[in-house]
Image (tube, rainbow, N blue to C red):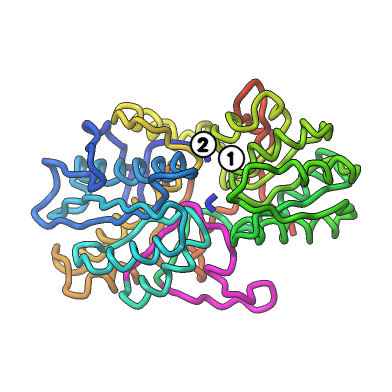
Amino acid sequence: MRQRSLIAITAALAAGALTLTACGSRDSGDKGSDSSSGGGTTVVIGVDAPLTGDLSALGLGIKNSVDLAAKTANKQDYVKGITFKIEALDDQGQPSSGQQNATKLVADKSVLGVVGPLNSSVAESMQKVFDDAKLVEVSPANTNPALTQGTNWQTSKSRPYKSYFRTATTDAIQGPFAAQYLFNDAKKKKVFVIDDKKTYGAGLAATFTEEFKKLGGTVAGSEHINPDTKDFSAVATKVKNSGADVVYYGGEYPQAGPLSKQIKAAGAKIPVIGGDGIYSADFIKLAGATATGDLATSVGAPVEELPSAKEFVANYKTAGYKEAYEAYGGYSYDSGWAIIEAVKKVVEDNDGKLPSDARAKVAEAMQNVSFDGVTGKVSFDEYGDATNKQLTVYAVKNGAWEPVKSGTYTG
């Protein structure tokens, strides 16, 4: 995923230093960024994310941040002759809905790029639909390695879809990074591993477990939970009886919060750690007072501390969005801006106009997009993965997430 509180600022773009300007008032509708600035041709950036349901805090942050990117491009007249708008569709975190949304976006010929989805399982259902239509997709949150490197990524990497990119790093790095922090820094030696059986959660738990055992740690037990329930008392009792000194959870905050609370209530006064899927203020609300000391890893550096992010944060506030930008706001802005950069390249290469095969050309141009974004340097490797591999460990302190360590996985 997907997998949360963010971010920032001056997009000093590849063409030169471009300072973000404050945006106008927020559109109430999902279609987003109309602006009096910009040119006569409208280019739509699709957005697919959970806009309702348990994960809507993250999804709305994604939507709003892409909307801010589109509005900023229009106000700057960044691509001559082009006005950007967004079309945001709700997948509710469900693969079937995501696939339907992908089909709908493909049918709209004005859509030249899509930001999303949040969930890796949803991305699996969308990739072929977009790739068949040569419609570029840039996810700010998907972390499952197979999406870019194929199902056999651990032994033989092969890119399945050339139209798919992401600005978030992968669980091949995130899981082991968490394992190294727990074993080497936090001195935790005995872990109980739990996952929600979904693509993101199970994959993340697997990469964590492999590295933790390699380092010399012990897996005291493992369990799968049903993400549709909120009663984890049986699992909590197993954790208590296992003697583990930490719990690793592969999944998302709607389940992780109650799980953490119930583990503590069962008598296991040990921290719960998860990936970017639990890095949300809503996790702390759901876990309650006993969440203090719980941990999460998330992609990138803590964006609020990046010089490049300060203006993003200020502009997001000025724009008046009701919802927080959350963990993926900065990555969503950069995903949207990557599409804008690709469109700019295509237009400039075609005498200031969109070519008849604009979608295919934009997808091709994305491979070489490179700019200084909200989250740092934005560019893509040969698999469509982000070249920025940095991660951060956060801990719950005084009712909020605070960064405790940033770095990269040293495999």
Residue type at numbered disc 1: Tyr
Structural crowding at the residue carrying mark 1, measured as other residues with C-alpha within 10 Å and reported as few (<14), some (14–19) or many (≥20): many
Most extreme residue toward the left is 40
Quarter occupied by residue 314: top left
Main SS of the magenta segment? loop
Q: Relative to the observer, which residue lies in front, 36 or 352?
A: 36
Left or right? Give the position of 115 relative to 271.
Answer: left
Considering only order in the chain, which callout, 2 or 1, is on the residue closer to the N terminus? 2
Q: Does the magenta-highlighted stretch encompass residue 226?
A: no
Left or right? Give the position of 346 relative to 259.
Answer: left
Under circle 1, the secondary element is loop
Q: Relative to the observer, which residue lies in front, 108 or 380?
A: 108
Quarter occupied by residue 341: bottom left
Q: Relative to the observer, which residue lies in front, 254 or 153?
A: 254
Q: Position of residue 216 (x, y in %)?
A: 90, 55
- The structure residue drawn at horizontal position 71% and vertical position 43%, both measured from the top left corner, is 232
Which region of the structure is painted magenta? 135-162
Residue 63, which numbered label? none
Q: Is residue 174 visible?
A: no
Q: Answer yes or no: do the residues labelled 1 and 2 have beta carbons within 8 Å?
A: yes
- Mark 1–mark 2 distance (CA, rounded to whole Å): 7 Å
- The structure residue drawn at horizontal position 77% and vertical position 31%, both measured from the top left corner, is 265
Residue 279, which numbered label? 1
- Establish if 265 lies above or below 49: above
Q: Is residue 411 visible?
A: yes
Which quadrant of the figure contains the C terminus? bottom right
Count the marks.
2
Left or right? Give the position of 411 relative to 314.
Answer: right
Residue type at numbered disc 2: Ser
Give the residue pinned by disc 2.
5
- The structure residue drawn at horizontal position 52% and vertical position 75%, both measured from the top left corner, is 159
Q: Position of residue 299 (x, y in %)?
A: 57, 47
